[in-house]
Image (cartoon, rainbow, N blue to C red):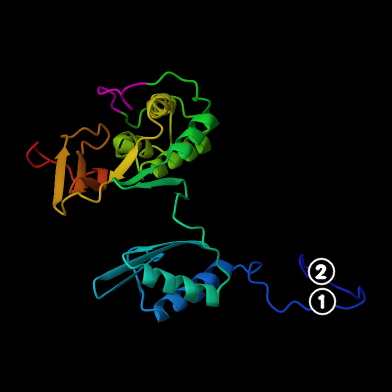
Amino acid sequence: MSVPQGVTCTNPNKVSKLHKSLYGLKQAGRQWFTRLTKCLLSLGYTQSHYEHSLFTKASNFVFTALLIYVDDLVLDGYSQKEIDLVKLCLDIHFKTKDLGPIKYFLGLEIARSTQGISLCQRKYALDILAHTGFLASKPTPTAIVKTTKLHQDTSTPHSDQAAYRRFVGRLIYLTNTRPDINYVVQQLSQFMAQPTITHQQALPRVLRYIKGSPGQGLFYSPTSALQLKAFSDSDWAACIDSCKSITGSCVFLGDSLVSWKSKKQTTVARSSSKA
């Protein structure tokens, strides 16, 4: 076998014995996450039942949250003492590197100031435009024409259905900070199984809309009142295929948008009031 990189071998006639190869195992990711979970649970953290990669700890008015993506961790909380303690414990059990205040994570761009925190996906949006050749396109004020009603038609099937699915998948991830395209993405994602030319023709307008504001995102103010406000509305039997209505809703914590969705209802409404 070849000597691993970083290992000095003075005698080439000796045999190298491999004690452990975590990254070569099929269960490497699972083993790594299991060990990290045990370490965090021993520190008093609680694993979320809804998002298993999220760990939280709340005690004596001190709240700390830790989010995991493979081997990247985001740690935030009220107490700097608690954060330093967690980083010290993780550094003892694992070889860690502190990258400082978060600025970029999984396509999310985070900017902090005294006025609040801004979240956007500008680079991610520009990458989509560059990949599709729409960087120099003319912007449009809306992501979809108001009278457009997408449905499962009988037009010619899309020539590259895999490309359509990849594109819509990237748009779905972009909705993490772009609630303004949530409706049109919901419409496009309904036809990922069998997209047609009609569905493909709706994509350029979405790209041109993103071109007009690639850095649009969310802003969270520290001075906003802790008042929960929710807004909801729906159309009536807008889906041509199923006659179901589409509900749109958003939830604000003060002036900060924290949740939003655009979803087709599960049953058919017999009137606009029921919708």
- Residue at screen point 9% across, 36% down: 272
**Mark 1 crowd level (few <14, some 14–19, many ≥20, 10 Å Cα):** few
Of 191 and 23, nearer the camera is 23
- Residue 125's disc is none
Residue 242 shows in the view:
yes
Mark 2 → mark 1, Cα distance in angstroms: 7 Å
* SS of the residue under disc 1: loop
- Residue at screen point 55% across, 64% down: 97
- Residue at screen point 24% across, 75% down: 60
Contact, CB < 8 Å: mark 2 with mark 1?
yes
**Mark 2 crowd level (few <14, some 14–19, many ≥20, 10 Å Cα):** few
| Count of numbered tags | 2
Q: Position of residue 169 (x, y in %)?
A: 44, 42
Q: Position of residue 19 (x, y in %)?
A: 71, 79
Residue 159 shows in the view:
no
What kind of secondary structure does the magenta stretch mostly adopt?
Answer: loop
Q: Which of the two labelled residues, at mark 2 and mark 1, occupies the earlier sequence position?
A: 2
Drawn side of residue 252 relative to residue 104, left or right:
left
Drawn side of residue 5 relative to residue 216, left or right:
right
| Residue situated furthest bottom in the rendering | 42
Amino acid type at mark 1: Ser
* Quadrant of the rendering where the N terminus is positioned: bottom right
Of 237 and 118, nearer the camera is 118
* SS of the residue under disc 2: loop
| Residue situated furthest front in the rendering | 114
- Residue 3's disc is 2
Please tell me whether residue 124 is drawn above or below residue 209 in the rendered image: below
The span shown in magenta is 140-149
Q: Where does label 1 land, which residue? A: 16
Q: Quadrant of residue 9?
A: bottom right
